[in-house]
Image: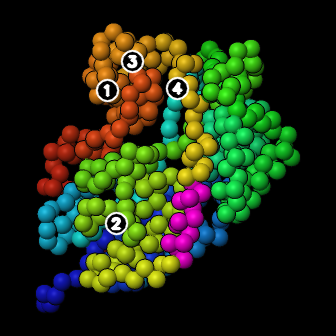
Amino acid sequence: MSTEPGPPRLAIVGAGPAGLAAALAAAGRGVRVTVVDAGRAAGGQYYRQPSAGLGTRRPQALHHQWRTWRRLREGLVREVAAGRVTHLPDHHVWCVEQRSEGAGRFTVHALLGPDRERPVEVRADAVLLATGSYERVLPFPGWTLPGVITAGGAQAMLKGTLAVSGRTAVVAGTGPLLLPVATGLAAAGVTVAALVESADPRVLARRAGALAGRADKLAEGAGYAVQLLRRRVRTLVHHTVVEAHGADRLEAVTVAALDAEGRVRRGTGRRVPCDTLAVGHGLLPHTDLADALGCRIESTGPRVWVDEEQRTDVPGVWAAGETTGIGGAALSLAEGHIAGRSAADRLRGRVPDPAAWAGAAKSRAALREFSAVLDSVYVPPAHWTEQVTDDTAVCRCEEVTAGAVREAVGELGAGDLRTVKLLTRAGMGWCQGRMCGPAVAGIAGCEQGVSRRPFAQPVPLGVLARAGENGEESDGDAPP
């Protein structure tokens, strides 16, 4: 029996645009690739697909860049069939553990299935984190009413289930995501009563020169705007949602104009009847796994720091996509391609040649510059906390109100987010502050900083006690 070691193993966490691009770039270059993903099908949130049982005749109607998705999907199927890639869906990664040295020094710990109680371990010689992002949630009076959902949640519901939460919607907040959400809902037959964008169009006009280099992105945005005009969707710029109204569920929202400083202008409020409010204020990178591995996390974002090869400062760990900074699918694809090629070469003991990914690097630089401009334009209103009343819930898990947070700061002397958490229990619930962290920090007037979490998601104590002992193991040859 041969005792020669097998090919080096690369574990990729996440099967969105960055993870798929990385897997295809690394496959066939002498490494064994295992893609571990929480989704039941590849694609991530961006390429989320409706269940086959729904019998969708034209799923491409829910997406743009359909050809890119089809190329990625067909590539994954081809590499899996060839035995170069193993795809492990429905695997929820809660921790990546590393030893100081030796082959197979990384162990990816995951929970299998919807109940997340069956532990699985994947061994690898290197790890590539493509864990994506999550939505920034900011509270306002009435935001906990049934019918109030995040903008990304509305889009995911439409893409994944072909369902909508009501017949009349208001789409509000800030950021480019609002355009496809409003367009998608309108195309699905929902009456979009208003698109409420808090950004000041004059700021966008002043940065037009910096945006001109990505004519494709500008054309994409213009296409959405044209569709909304055709459907007579009213657009209110430099406005914000002040309050959501309703008894047992959402019945209407009040929106108002903002002044030059980002404060609500008195006397401009108007009530808009609706049964759905899709609200979003941008995205935040998922950094939990990288942080637990000891990777450098930059405070802006926060986001995982990477070099020109998408390597983190922890040897053997790469990162790509939204976890390194919010920039959209095209940027994620470029970063994933670079990361996959770099990881494969390094694992085989070769020094990568940057010329091999020159096109992706050029695209990455342009898209990062474009995204930085958008980040400077699409920011939440500077004084959004002034509209949050004391009785407004901030941390839904622990039912902590804005008043309790303000009391912790003003009367009990809390000067940082950790002390606020200890005094109020804000952030101690199921989400561990992932959802309420930005809101609590804003109301407390504290820097949010980088949250230190040993696990990326809740783990049953029984699984934690058995970790490394009774969990099923996969080395990338086949799913467990």
Disc on the earlier residue, 3 or 4: 4
- Mark 1 to mark 2 CA distance (whole Å): 32 Å
Relative vertical location of residue 426 with respect to residue 457 in this rendering, above or below: above
Query: In the drawing, what numbered circle is on residue 405?
Result: 3
Which secondary structure lies at badge 4? Answer: loop
- Tell me the residue that label 1 is attached to: 416
Let me know if residue 365 is in the magenta part: yes
x, y percent for residue 434: 40, 37
- Tell me the residue that label 4 is attached to: 139
Q: Residue at x 34, y 78 (%)?
A: 344
Which secondary structure lies at badge 1? Answer: loop
Disc on the earlier residue, 4 or 2: 4
- Mark 2 to mark 3 CA distance (whole Å): 39 Å
x, y percent for residue 112: 33, 53
Q: Which residues are magenta?
A: 359-371
- Mark 4 to mark 2 CA distance (whole Å): 36 Å
- Identify which amino acid the numbered label 3 is placed on: Val
Q: Residue at x 45, y 17 (%)?
A: 402
Along the line of sight, which residue is nearer the eye, 360 or 31? Answer: 360
- Identify which amino acid the numbered label 1 is placed on: Asp
Whether residue 278 is visible here, answered yes or no, is: no
- Identify which amino acid the numbered label 2 is placed on: Arg
- Tell me the residue that label 2 is attached to: 311
- Mark 1 to mark 4 CA distance (whole Å): 20 Å
Name the mark nearer the viewer: 3 or 1. 1
Name the mark nearer the viewer: 3 or 4. 3
| Residue 99 falls in image quadrant | bottom left
x, y percent for residue 300: 43, 46
